[in-house]
Image (spheres, grey):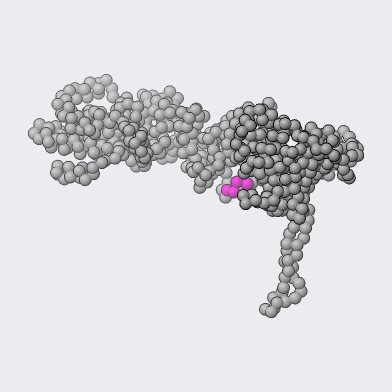
Amino acid sequence: MSKRQFKAESKRLLDLMINSIYTHKEIFLREIISNASDAIDKLCYISLTDDKVGLDRQDFFIRIEADKGTRTLTVKDNGVGMTQEDMESNLGVIAHSGSLQFKNDMPEESDSSIDIIGQFGVGFYSAFMVSDKVTVISRAYGSETAYKWESSGADGYTITECEKPSVGTDIIMHIKPDTDDENYSIYLESWKIRELIKKYSDYVRWPIKMDVSHTEYKETGEKDENGNAKTEPVTTVSEETINSMVPIWQRSRSQVSDEDCIAFYKEHFHDLDDPVAVIRVDAEGLTSYKAMLFIPAKAPYDFYSRDYKPGLTLYSSGVMIMENCADLIPDCFRFVRGIVDSPDLSLNISREILQHDRQLKIISGNLEKKIKSELSSIMEKDPEKYDKFWDSFGRQIKYGIVDNYGIKKDLLKDLLKFPSSGSDKPTSLKDYVSRMPEAQKYIYYATGDSLKTASGLPQNEQIKSKGYEILYFTDDVEEFVAQILGSYEEKEFRSVTSSDLGLESEEDKKELEAEAEKSKPLIDYLKECLKDEVADVKLSSALVTSPVCMSYEGDISLEMERYFSAIPGEAGQQVKARRVLELNPSHHIFSALEAAFESDKEKAGKIAQVLCTQAKLLAGLPVDDLAGYTELVCQLI
């Protein structure tokens, strides 16, 4: 019996695998079970036209056997089996999964710790990650002769004739001895095997059976010294089917109610609350897939942390490929949980290939539209439910607009909601625009660290006096949302702290210009006094009852300055708005300022400092010398 050599690419793969450090060794069982399932599929198909098979659909199964004494884990199937030639082609060469290209691209001196499975699907070869010897005994349908394939790794393999009473394949893996770094014995434990089956192969369409032991305590008929009945443990072993076989998302809507889907969600994703929505998709065409998605009602505790793992669970014909496939949904919808199952995706698809897979991109694009449509429908038909969703995930939608320079802004803009002066509940941009008077040019918004602060800005007065509505931004990211969107339905966003609110008539402008010309000496003096605090001082028509406010000119707003100033380091401190101190010429304080300027310029300078500090406080800007401000107020009193 001569030993045969693997083909070059297979030998290299095995050598890399056996000597690699790979953290997901457990997927070997998924791969072996999937091969067994494929073999049964083939014989089941043959049985449709060949009555000699002698097996009905309910007769097919996969059996798992673990023997701690011999350290072997065996996976048996009664599928189509393999001939000697099949063994040569299936077990002697690498699987068709882009692996040859990987071999060609990999330099000989590559790091041996490379993530092999992260590069391509390894199929049968994954057994060598946990085994130091693999034996395959198989008898093909239609053949009376069985063959045994045996290998201890990259040094080669043997194929010999053997006895096997029935058609099918047994894969016997001799589990490696434990090391200081790896506990291989765990793959011989019944609980671990069942855990891996439930995790990766629960929805394989054929029953996966194994012997399971149960221990019960039964009375012996005797009593202890306290008169209590004595018990002793009795262990029984019975064969059980471990997998559920038919996934809920593969069943038709008539077979599965929304209540069933919600129960599945709560159990599978460990959530006590019902989801806001269940989205079911059954797509056929160039790319066929089924999906069951859930929009949670509340954000998990780690949602906004680095520990949170977004993504949908990806299956191929009931076999899990990836637990958290982030490529299936955009980051703006990272809160969505669920499952996608497509027969068009190869089981051996890799994490690297996933990033570029055309079919995956098609699925992702379709799911993105489905999620947006579902959220839009909830917003329209059940506003109260949407408001609860918005409380949990509104920030994620807003971040989604800002992310990647607004690449998703058109997708998300209709989902936004903000507090408003025109409604006691958050309003959408669509509803805001629908209420705008014909003469209103801009979508006005006021920003503050709280609703009370934003609604109390002095600049709000003139806008409200015109009967115009104001959106209140109380989240740091909302100012950037407005900047990224720029406009909505051709209505430009305009901060109430902007130096140009577009509200003055030509007559108002001329009147203000005349007043400014008359007060030019005072204004010039104030500019000199406050040159370290503001870029400009001017009279304002934006104020009604308030004496002063702080506005800005240019692209950097006061809100942006406040945001960046909170970031540690020098970079944030360098982002400064061009501040403009605006004075109300109709207010009695301005008259007092004018009088002081004529009689006591030093006092006028102190009043200007107080007004400037008040304007900064109203705008939510930091005041460096509160003690000095207090002293100035006391001097003036």
Residue at the spot 49% in from the left edge and 40% down from the top edge: 393
Residue at the spot 55% in from the left edge and 33% down from the top edge: 330
Name the chief secondary structure element in magenta. loop
Number of numbered discs: 0
Q: Is 291 a magenta residue?
A: no
Q: In which quarter of the image is the C terminus?
A: top left
Q: In which quarter of the image is the N terminus?
A: top right
Q: Where is residue 74 in the image (x, y as percent from the top left)?
A: 77, 47
Q: Is 268 a magenta residue?
A: yes
Residue 41: quadrant of the picture: top right
What range is drawn magenta here?
267-271
Residue 629: quadrant of the picture: top left
Residue at the spot 44% in from the left edge and 38% down from the top edge: 426
Residue at the spot 69% in from the left edge and 27% down from the top edge: 285
In the displayed structure image, the side of residue 16 where residue 397 appears, left or right:
left
Q: Is residue 203 visible?
A: no
Residue 217 vertical placement versus 55 (above, below): below
Residue 445: quadrant of the picture: top left
Query: Which one is in front, 106 or 119?
Result: 106
Q: Where is residue 337 in the image (x, y as percent from the top left)?
A: 58, 41
In the displayed structure image, the side of residue 599 where residue 172 appears, left or right:
right
Q: Where is residue 627 in the image (x, y as percent from the top left)?
A: 21, 45
Q: Is residue 547 visible?
A: yes
Query: Which one is in front, 6 or 388?
Result: 6
Q: Position of residue 6 (x, y in %)?
A: 75, 34
Query: Which one is in front, 532 or 526?
Result: 532
